[in-house]
Amino acid sequence: MNTSTPRRTDDWGADFFGTINEMPPEPISLIIQILEAMGTEPGFRGARQTLLRELGLAQGATILEAGCGTGTSLPDIQAVIGSEGRVTGIDPTVAFIDAARRRVVTCPYQNETYEIGDIRALSAADNSFDAAFCDKVLIHAGPASVALGELARVTRPGGAVGALEWLPFFAVSSRRPELVARYNGLFRQAVYDYEVSSNLARHLHAAGLTDVRSQAFLAYASSLDEHPFWRAFLIDQMPLFVHVGLLTAEEAEGLCSDFLELDALGEFNASFVIQVAVGRKPA
Ligand SMILES: C[S@@+](CC[C@H](N)C(=O)[O-])C[C@H]1O[C@@H](n2cnc3c(N)ncnc32)[C@H](O)[C@@H]1O
């Protein structure tokens, strides 16, 4: 039985990722494409694979992913816990849970459950899982202390809790530094907790976890087509930022042409930092 689920309080917050259920289908399908690309981009994927290894799970373990999105992590989780393991994913976005359920049908093992849920008030009972984690969620919804407290609550004593976050600050080649400053600045405005990636160890400690270890990873590309993530995120997504008023159409056009021209000249490169932290629930 769930004995200690925190109730909604005034400090709960979220950015646009908390409102996707109210959006029309077109931006949702673009966001789904970007999530798929993020899921396999080598920097993000290497960080997630490290997080999953650091959870120290055995084959057959049970794991919760809170804020699972479309379930892009499923192959990496299954590589760790095998065919006897059990994966539970929760996310508040209906279109993402539908996509995750479609993914399960094509998957070699069938031990996954994807349900609507909120990381800040999980429906699972205390001590239900061997491990729990979240990947690119705390930047969008929180507070992190409540979310990680919930992951700790549903993890068994001796189990592990992990989080992956990134700092959306692109070190990107450009002949328009003023536009790159506008671009990087929009994320500080748009996301719920811009600084969370640098504070994962602190938040895990506050959630009562011990033996906390953290690591940093770099996502890097020297061409817009090195991986689908880069063109999807830096070019295809730009109209959304204009639509919500974070950039003007001229700024977006200026950035896109600059990135595309530098790419054609073989002078494009871009990078950003990802952080992972894992802690253990005291036995
Ligand atoms: C950037 S996506 C990451 C999705 C997935 N973890 C991945 O790596 O592909 C952020 C996710 O957080 C989810 N989200 C937003 N508010 C949430 C909340 N209160 N509880 C749990 N997930 C939430 C969104 O629906 C979205 O799926």
Image: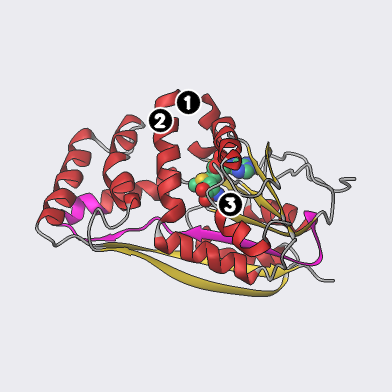
**On residue 27, which mark appears?**
2
Q: Does 9 sit above or below residue 155?
A: above
> Where, quadrant-wise, is the N terminus in this rendering?
top right
Q: Does 142 sit above or below residue 22?
A: below
Q: Which residue is mark 1?
A: 23
Q: Amino acid at mark 2?
A: Pro
> In the image, is 206 to the left or to the right of 240?
right
Q: Which residue is mark 3?
A: 74
Residue at 56% across / 59% down in the picture?
A: 76
Q: CA distance from mark 1 to mark 3?
A: 26 Å
Q: Mark 1 or mark 3: which is in front?
A: 3
Q: Amino acid at mark 3?
A: Leu
Coordinates of residue 157 in the picture (x, y in percent): 83, 66
Q: Earlier in the sequence, mark 2 or mark 3?
A: 2
Q: Quadrant of ligand 1?
A: top right
Q: Which residues are magenta?
A: 154-180
